[in-house]
Amino acid sequence: EVQLLESGGGLVQPGGSLRLSCAASAFTFSSYAMSWVRQAPGNGLEWVSGISGSGVTTHYANSVKGRFTISRDNSQNTLYLQMNSLRAEDTAIYYCAKSLGSTTLRHMDVWGQGTTVTVSS
Amino acid sequence: DIVLTQSPATLSLSPGERATLSCRASQSVSSYLAWYQQKPGQAPRLLIYDASNRATGIPARFSGSGSGTDFTLTISGLEPEDFAVYYCQQGSNWPLTFGGGTKVEIK
């Protein structure tokens, strides 16, 4: 069964940093683009960042550009999100998600259960 | 960024009734529109991709239609497990964007 397992969430002070990880299993990880999507408490879904299967191409939401960095280690089947200069508005559940198709990232067919990030002093 | 506007915000229906959810894009997204279902405390689940294709394991009562800027998700006869929040998402342009969601609640 295809699975994604996020980790690394927690409580961090404003201005601080955090690194999220997403361990993938039961599919050819390097063949699929991946995304991070977040959901603030009581709010809707917000796409955060995406990365191609090779890791060469990355995209970001305007709200995190310059502060967050997405990366992947295909030898370890793991996706990462480095989050710097964190703000209260970054407080959310962060989901990693697998691209439906192997060629482009348009839609997401497998999601992890999420990891919670809280930015507060 | 492409803005997706979902309507209505809340839909109050009874089991067995037909649900019609709308998603309108601020510019054309061709057919690159997906629908997700989310229940409380759970991750989203892909229902429909490329506007009208059901994802693996999704029951036939879920159908999608539309292209360009106007899209519809139809649930032909609501089952108790279908009461949830539904989001549309465009995969045409970066950044990817989601609509604000439609909550389908029991009347």
Image: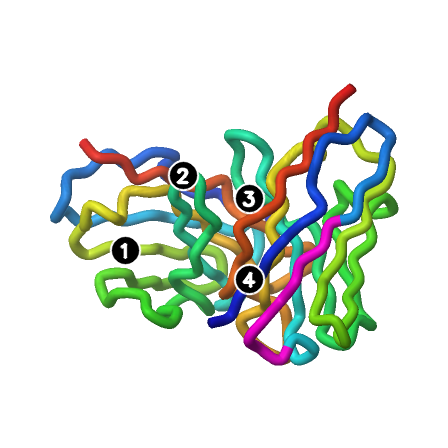
Chain that bears disc 4: B
Residue at position x 46%, y 60% in the image: B34
Q: Give A42 or B95, whichever is nearer the viewer.
A: A42
Residue range highlighted in magenta: A20-28
* B31 displayed left or right of A90: left
Mark earlier in primary sequence (4, 2): 4
Q: Is residue A23 magenta?
A: yes
Chain that bears disc 1: B
What residue is disc 2 on?
B40
Discs 4 and 1 share one subunit: yes
Q: Is residue A45 magenta?
A: no
Name the kind of residue labelled 1 in the image: Thr
Q: Quadrant of the C terminus of chain A?
A: top right
Q: Secondary structure at mark 2?
A: loop
**2 vs 3, front mark:** 2
Can you say whether A47 is above or below B52 in the image?
above
What residue is disc 4 on?
B29
CA distance for labels 2 and 1: 21 Å
Main secondary structure found in the magenta portion: strand
